[in-house]
């Protein structure tokens, strides 16, 4: 028997190219924006963190991010499906982290 929810899920994943995207938290419209977002201004942020490691929580995404790491060897009830096939599940977990806990999560599927 064919599972219609599988078909719908595949269609939606294909349309969206997955479930996640990176969106900048700051504008990047001018040369001045680029100078504080990247170079030379970001060097000041890096030096501040080098001087006081705790600043990393106030000056970067570290306070609200987690990594979801797998090699795909034990995925849900699917078993050893490999890192490629595990990625949609890890993306789903990342969506749950964002929507339920306000955390930005990065799925990392390693071929080990």
Image (cartoon, rainbow, N blue to C red):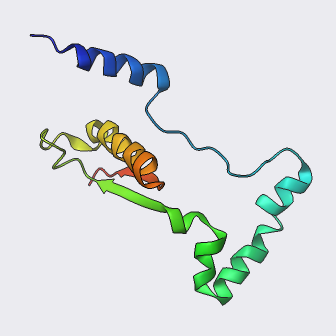
At a point 64% along the width and 88% down the height, the residue shown is: 52
Q: Quadrant of residue 12?
A: top left
In the figure, 39 relative to 34: above or below? below
Residue 37 rendering spot, x and y as whole percentages: 77, 59
At a point 47% along the width and 19% down the height, the residue shown is: 15
Q: Quadrant of residue 3?
A: top left
Residue at the limit of the structure toward the bottom, as seen here: 51
At a point 53% along the width and 68% down the height, the residue shown is: 63
If the image is split into quadrants, where does the N terminus sit?
Answer: top left
Residue at the limit of the structure toward the top, as seen here: 1
If the image is split into quadrants, where does the C terminus sit?
Answer: bottom left
Q: Tag count in the figure?
A: 0
Left or right for 25, reference 30:
left
Left or right for 25, reference 90:
right
Residue 109 rendering spot, x and y as whole percentages: 33, 49
Residue 68 rendering spot, x and y as whole percentages: 35, 55
Residue 77 rendering spot, x and y as whole percentages: 12, 40
In the figure, 57 relative to 82: above or below? below
Q: Quadrant of residue 23?
A: top right
Of 22 and 70, nearer the camera is 22
Can residue 42 be seen here? The reply is yes
Can residue 38 be seen here? The reply is no
At a point 25% along the width and 18% down the height, the residue shown is: 5
């Amino acid at each position: 028997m064919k599972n219609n929810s599988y078909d719908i899920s595949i269609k939606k994943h294909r349309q969206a190219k997955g479930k996640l995207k990176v969106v900048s938290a700051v504008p990047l419209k001018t040369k001045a924006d680029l100078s504080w977002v990247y170079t030379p201004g970001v060097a000041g942020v890096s030096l501040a963190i080098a001087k006081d490691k705790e600043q990393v929580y106030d000056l970067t995404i570290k306070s609200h991010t987690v990594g979801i790491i797998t090699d795909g060897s034990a995925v849900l009830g699917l078993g050893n499906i490999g890192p490629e096939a595990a990625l949609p599940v890890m993306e789903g977990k990342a969506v749950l982290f964002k929507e339920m806990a306000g955390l930005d999560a990065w799925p990392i599927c390693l071929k080990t």
